[in-house]
Amino acid sequence: MPEVKKSDDGVQIDLIGGERMSGKTSMEKIRMILDSVHEGNIVILEEGLAPDEESKLIEVTMAEISPDEFSGIEIETYPRSKTSDSGFLGRLMGRESSGSKLTVIGPANQIETLHKDENLISALISRK
Amino acid sequence: MGLFTGLKQSIRRVTDKLFTSEEPKRIGIYGPPNAGKTTLANRIARDWTGDAVGPESHVPHETRRARRKENVEIERDGRTVTIDIVDTPGVTTKVDYEEFLDHDMEKEDAVRRSREATEGVAEAMHWLREDVDGVIYVLDSSTDPFTQVNTMLIGIIESQDLPVLILANKTDLEGSSVQRIRNAYPQHETIPLSALEGENMDEVYTKIAEYFG
């Protein structure tokens, strides 16, 4: 990552398929995401991250924040449907979550979420 | 097995597993920056021990390292619940030192504050995975609760099977809407309060005893 040559006057978007992430460890996934975001890219994950991986992503992001260089990430995920079986109640009742969700991650100083609802994420991406 | 019977039994299994020993349970107070976590921690600590946990401020990330108040004994209906309160820094995915410059801070102080804040958030995330037995999740009821960080954090807490009590704080503020929080996280009970004014703390203590005792 990244496989596409970066343009000086554009913003690169990496759409990462679920299959590409499936064989990786949590830290390999987080490294792939943050390396790309550090380069100013926007990462879109077809299948998102597990809760434990989201927790580690925040932890590692915090360790890499540096004044005037990297101020962190913006992250948006399609919310799970309130009527779905995922989440605490679903697990209590023995129903497994599909885990399928789409996640957008970008540099905090370049991406601003304009709108989000259950099936639309609008983001403004600036070139810096 | 009916839905509610199954739910009840499952909750009992989780709480029985967590609360069989006599050791105080570590209850982490989590939530976004400026939700009133330290004000709540101080209110609980003062009410039951007479001491505060840490300084409160309107400046984001005033709490930059987790602070613990041990052996807080809460009495409810003749029972005593003993907990360690862990007040954590506000969880976020970004920290920009420039936001502190708006609070009459020199750059050097702002950079130091942001470094401490990032270390504190990383520590709080680590503790959430490893070191707390239950969570009090504090939200500012005058702001939109449906943020990515809140959704992620509550998802992380749920994935750990930790008991979580959601508090809708700052009900004293204009624009406060407890219902907005209930709508955002309907899978959890939401308790309204004003930690600053001490309003509805009786119900908060009853729920703490119920969830963590």
Image (spheres, rainbow, N blue to C red):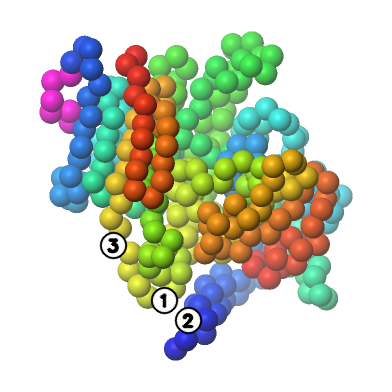
Element marked by disc 2:
helix
- Which residue is found at the position 63% from the left and 55% from the top? B179
Q: Mark 1 or mark 3, which is nearer the start of the sequence? A: 1
Q: Mark 1 points at which residue?
A: A93
Q: Give the range drawn in magenta.
A: A1-6
Do the residues under discs 2 and 1 have CB atoms within 8 angstroms? Answer: yes
Q: Where is residue B11 in the image (x, y as percent from the top left)?
A: 54, 75
Q: Can residue B140 be seen in this view?
A: yes
Are callouts 2 and 3 both on one chain? no
Amino acid type assigned to the residue bearing label 1 in the image? Met
Host chain of mark 2: B
Q: Mark 3 points at which residue?
A: A98
- Which residue is found at the position 59% from the left and 12% from the top? B108
Host chain of mark 3: A
> Is A42 displayed left or right of A92 in the figure?
left
Q: Quadrant of residue A80?
A: bottom left
Q: Main secondary structure of the magenta part?
A: loop
Host chain of mark 1: A
